Image: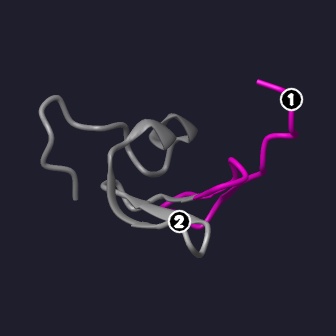
C-alpha cells in the first residue's frame, strides 16, 4: 500500500505508527496511514492485522 521511498514500516508492526498519513479526520479523532494502520488522537491504534495498540496515558512517553 505504501509507495514512499524508503517504504514506511509495515502495518502489522507497532513501529508502523510512524507511517505517513493518507487520510485525516481530526474532527472524528482518527487518521489512516499509508500502511493500513488507523491512528487515533489518544495515541491508540488499530494495526492492519486488527491488533490493537492501547492509548498512551497522558504525560507518559
Position above or below: 9 against 37: above
For mark 1, give the secondary structure. loop
Quarter of the figure with the N terminus? bottom left
Position above or below: 23 against 43: below
In the image, 33 versus 15, the foreground residue is 33
* Residue 27: assigned label: none
Inspect the magenta stretch and tell me whether residue 47 lies in it: yes
User: What secondary structure predominates along the stretch shown in magenta?
Assistant: loop
Q: Which span of residues is magenta-colored? A: 40-61
x and y percentages locating residue 9 in the rendered image: 36, 37
* Residue 26: assigned label: 2
Q: Quote the CA–CA distance across marks 1 and 2.
A: 21 Å
First along the sequence among labels 1 and 2: 2
Q: Residue furthest top?
A: 61
Q: Which residue is mark 1?
A: 59
Tell me how the rendering is colored. one colour
In the image, 16 versus 57, the foreground residue is 57
Task: Give the class, few, some or many, for how many residues have Cα within 10 Å of label 1's Cα (few <14, many ≥20).
Answer: few
Residue 19 occupies which quadrant of the picture?
Answer: top left
x and y percentages locating residue 35 in the rendered image: 34, 54
Q: Residue at x 78, y 51 (%)?
A: 54
Amino acid at each position: 500500500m505504501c509507495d514512499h521511498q524508503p517504504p514506511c514500516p509495515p502495518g502489522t508492526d507497532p513501529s508502523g505508527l510512524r507511517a505517513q498519513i493518507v487520510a485525516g479526520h481530526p474532527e472524528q479523532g482518527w487518521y489512516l496511514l499509508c500502511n493500513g494502520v488507523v491512528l487515533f488522537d489518544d495515541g491508540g491504534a488499530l494495526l492492519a492485522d486488527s491488533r490493537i495498540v492501547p492509548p498512551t496515558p497522558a504525560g507518559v512517553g
